[in-house]
């Protein structure tokens, strides 16, 4: 409840700022301003209705397209308008500075000293001139911000709705048995099946994974944004996943946001041939050598007594074996380091999804995207193959990773 109230306050504050810059600063008092003000009120209600309607009732999912696209536009309008505040202020100040007027030559008066010279006083600007200048600056700023925001959102939509990038990554594990060298993982996360994706989104991801011919498929959480009843049909293509040693899944935070919780999806995936690792591990036997593949539940599972249990997943294993851990959030490496994990595969961050959110992610997660070493554990964070909220990705294209061990 507290989070919902905070979000509403933020949405109201953002739209008030947009009203001041896009309506008040670009129109004179009158009919046009009143009409645009009501448009802004309608956009506030659209954002609120989208966040509520797409979570509560599938019948309101039609709100997702207009609501989330405006949300992205709203975000980038604010970004560009804030950037333009400085040039806007400078231009306003320069425009108001009075011009330097010519100093009149003194006239000599017979028998007396020349009178003191004074510059002619500039005439004060009329009210009409001041309003015209303000409107010109306001409209120019709004035009630049609007064009930049539309271009950015358009580019971001094309990126988000297009095919994922294949990222080929090689990871060296010191403990890896040479016979396991070349073992390949197809890593995908944050697919976010939902009202904006469609079954084509799933089919494309499955086809691209199969073309990689992986040994293991790892789906690292945030598969869905709804219930099996709502989205089960979109998950059916996962039945066609192909790999030598199977496909594995761990829960992400969004699996715990669904109305019925994650258990129905665990059962659904099991029927599609995707095994869920719920605080457990399996042995991957390859060319006579063994690798431990473990998986832990997402942190948010703790709200349903279904949180991560590292001891259950990793305790009592043969420490001489290399271990790959599937954990949705990179921050879970804080616990993984205590169990001698060699490599953690994570998602969750989307790589920031929309610049400049990538600058905010490090305040919560130790890795934004790519391969890094945290407390002695190598962590690979995929940007994810889908999107959450707006169908927009800027600076963080969707990704499927082909990760090869050596």
Image (cartoon, rainbow, N blue to C red):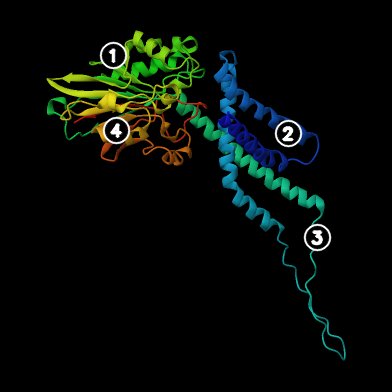
Q: CA distance from mark 2 to mark 1?
A: 54 Å
Instruction: First in sequence, mark 2 or 1: give its number.
Output: 2
Label 3 or label 4, whichever comes before in sequence order? 3
Residue on which the image places disc 1: 242
Say few, some or many: other residues with alpha carbon within 10 Å of mark 4 (under 14 / 14 to 19 / 20 or more).
Answer: many
- The image's mark for residue 37 is 2
Task: Provide residue 345's location: percent of width, then percent of height.
Answer: 31, 29
Task: Mark 3 and mark 2 in contact? Answer it, CB < 8 Å.
Answer: no
Q: Nearer the viewer, mark 3 or mark 1?
A: 1
In this picture, residue 49 sits left or right of residue 215 = right
The answer to whether residue 214 shows anywhere in this view is no
Residue 21, quarter of the rendered image: top right
Mark 1 → mark 4, Cα distance in angstroms = 29 Å
Point out the tag, 1 or 4, that comes first from the N-terminus.
Answer: 1
Q: Determine the residue located farthest toward the bottom in the rendered image.
A: 111
Dot label at residue 124: 3
Res. 160 visible in picture: yes
**Disc 2/disc 4 C-alpha distance (Å):** 52 Å
Spot occupied by residue 162 in the image (x, y as percentages of width and height)? 44, 24
Give the structural element (helix, strand or loop) at label 1.
Answer: loop
Q: Is residue 385 above or below residue 394?
A: above
Compared to 393, does 290 lie above or below?
above
Residue at mark 4: 336
How far apart in space, not on screen, are marks 3 and 2 (Cα)?
Answer: 32 Å
Q: Residue at x 33, y 36 (%)?
A: 334
- Mark 1 or mark 3, which is nearer the start of the sequence? 3
> Is 131 on the left or on the right of 225, as rendered?
right
* Foreground tag (3 vs 4): 4
């Amino acid at each position: 409840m507290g989070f919902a109230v905070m979000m509403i306050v933020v949405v109201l504050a953002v739209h008030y700022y947009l009203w001041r810059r896009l309506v008040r600063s670009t129109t004179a008092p009158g009919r046009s301003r009143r009409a645009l003000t009501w448009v802004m009120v309608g956009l506030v209600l659209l954002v609120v209705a989208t966040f509520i309607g797409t979570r509560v009732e599938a019948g309101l999912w039609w709100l997702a397209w207009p609501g989330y696209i405006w949300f992205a536009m709203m975000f980038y309008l604010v970004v560009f308008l804030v950037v333009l505040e400085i040039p806007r202020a400078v231009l306003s100040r320069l425009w108001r500075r009075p011009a330097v007027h010519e100093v009149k030559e003194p006239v000599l008066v017979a028998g007396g000293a020349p009178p003191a010279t004074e510059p002619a006083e500039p005439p004060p600007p009329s009210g009409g001139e001041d309003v015209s200048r303000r409107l010109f600056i306001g409209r120019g700023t709004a035009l630049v911000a609007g064009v930049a925001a539309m271009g950015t959102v358009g580019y971001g939509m094309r990126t988000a709705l297009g095919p994922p990038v294949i990222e080929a990554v090689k990871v060296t594990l010191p403990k890896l048995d040479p016979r396991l060298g070349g073992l390949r993982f197809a890593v995908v996360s944050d697919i976010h099946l939902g009202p904006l994706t469609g079954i084509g989104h799933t089919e494309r991801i499955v086809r691209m994974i199969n073309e990689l011919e992986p040994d293991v498929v790892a789906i690292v959480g945030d598969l869905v944004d709804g219930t099996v009843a709502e989205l089960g049909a979109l998950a059916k293509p996962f039945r066609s996943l192909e790999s030598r040693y199977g496909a594995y899944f761990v829960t992400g935070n969004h699996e715990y946001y669904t109305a019925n919780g994650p258990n129905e999806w665990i059962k659904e995936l099991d029927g599609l041939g995707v095994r869920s690792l719920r605080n457990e591990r399996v042995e991957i036997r390859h060319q006579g050598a063994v690798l431990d593949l473990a998986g832990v539940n997402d942190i948010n599972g703790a709200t349903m007594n279904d949180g991560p249990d590292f001891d259950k997943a990793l305790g009592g294993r043969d420490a001489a074996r290399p271990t790959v851990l599937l954990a949705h959030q990179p921050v879970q490496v804080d616990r993984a380091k205590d169990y001698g994990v060699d490599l953690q595969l994570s998602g969750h961050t989307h790589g920031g999804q929309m610049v400049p959110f990538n600058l905010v992610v490090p305040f919560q997660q130790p890795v934004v995207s790519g391969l890094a070493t945290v407390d002695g554990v190598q962590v690979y964070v995929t940007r994810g193959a889908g999107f959450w909220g707006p169908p927009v990705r800027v600076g963080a294209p969707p990704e499927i990773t082909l990760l090869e061990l050596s």
